Image: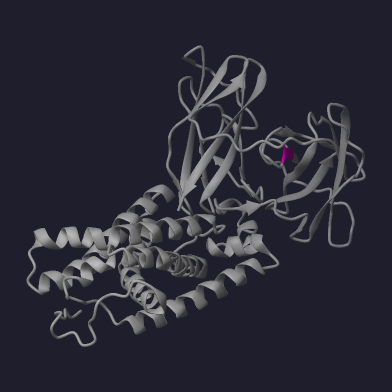
Amino acid sequence: MQATSHETHHGHHELPVRGRELTGVAVSATLHCLVGCAIGEIAGMVIGTALGLTNAATLILAIVLAFLFGYSLTSLPLLRAGLAIGAVIPIALASDTLSIATMELVDNAIVLLIPGAMDAGLDTLLFWGSLAFALVVAGAVAVPVNRRLIARGKGHAVVHETGIHGGPPVRMVGALAVAAFVFGTAVLLGEARSSDPVAMKMQRHGAAVEEATHGGDAAASDVRGLATTHGGMTLELARRPVRPGASATFAFRILDRDGQPVRNFEVEHERRMHLIVVRRDLTRFQHLHPEMAPDGTWSVPVTVAEPGSYRVFADFVHDGRRETLATDLNVDGDAGYRPLPPAKTVADAGAGYAVTKRNVVSKQARESRLVFEVSRGGKAVRLAPYLGAGGHLVVLREGDLAFLHVHPTADGAPAPGEPIEFATRFPSAGKYRLFLQFKAGGDVHTAAFTHEVTR
């Protein structure tokens, strides 16, 4: 970076105050400022992502570094030309503050609005494409801001008055900006045109659905329940009318490749079949244990309290392999879907029971131990075994309702005062709904938690 004085800088003249010449100066000033913003923004995003910081912490770090590098690119030529630091700081602040603030506001807003961008890893095109696109658009928005400032003798005009100029060549920066915009646009168009967004999301997080669903008990990162047919078996649900609040019989079969009912299921958690019914907004959770007739038809009575779209999961083990098949069930009426509740550490399980989830920080692709403590009236509760363990935990991902494999870390009920523990591996960052069931006082109780996973 080379500083040039007013006397030796060829073509130096008074700044224009209108017309195309003023626009050209504004573009040049914006590109200069964009370099510092880009360096800081990229550094902040990379550091935050690599360290697994929260989205808020990553954004704050990126903004701080953007201002730091933006001011530095303006200050270094002035310092090299011999200006005192006390004189340089006011010039840098006056020249770049509003420009950088505009770019940071627009840039980070775009990244937040692009689905999956903040959760994408450093090794994904979505991460770099979103960042490149957002930076260039932010620069474009900052041009009229800088143009107005320069016309009023502010912004970049303050630096121009010193007669000292520096920074990378404007044409080179402009060419890089065009290339970044083309690259970012191509990446985002590719994402938007994808015919299988669920599969692409799984690929971005480093695990294909096919691999995750074949992991068996040895793979704590099982992701299942995304398809009606998998592993040569199909969930066939009897399509009988279901009315809100009325008791109905759920009937279904598991069919093999030839369309014949499968009858040989293995016992898992003391049952050969677990049926999970939950509404799409992750409310109205039910865990049922149907009975199988000689012809391979499973059935169980169920009451669906509210209308809406429900996801039905059949969870079982066949030929030593865990499977979870799922299908949708629509219950006519005004659904009135609710947003996912905020993450809390204490949940009401009814009948005076409270469940406390230890504040464990879960990170994508790393094993997490989920620990729960059950109390009543502030005192620890003696739990009875439920499904062969201290409790049963179902974990569903917000959005696609992917079903995670979770296993208890110990058999049987814990000793009085000891928590219930489970282990799992979350495949992606985001929000999950945890449904913990335990047995106490002769009844089964359910507590639900929203659990956030960071990158």
Front residue of this view, candidates 278 and 107: 107
Front residue of this view, candidates 304 and 377: 304
Residue at (58, 34) in percent of width and height: 341
Q: Residue furthest bottom?
A: 10
- The residue range painted magenta reads 275-279
Q: Does any portion of residue 429 appear in the rendered image?
A: yes
Residue at (60, 38) in percent of width and height: 340
Residue at (61, 46) in percent of width and height: 398
Front residue of this view, candidates 409 and 346: 346
Occupied quadrant, residue 16: bottom left
Image side of residue 121 versus residue 50, left or right: right
Q: Does any portion of residue 47 appear in the rendered image?
A: no
Image side of residue 214 versus residue 16, left or right: right
Say which quadrant the N terminus sits in: bottom left
Residue at (74, 55) in percent of width and height: 227
Q: Position of residue 129 (x, y in %)?
A: 49, 70
Occupied quadrant, residue 171: bottom left
The answer to if 276 sits in the magenta stretch is yes
Q: Position of residue 155 (x, y in %)?
A: 29, 63
Q: Is residue 22 above or below residue 381?
A: below
Q: Residue furthest top?
A: 377
Q: Position of residue 389 (x, y in %)?
A: 58, 32
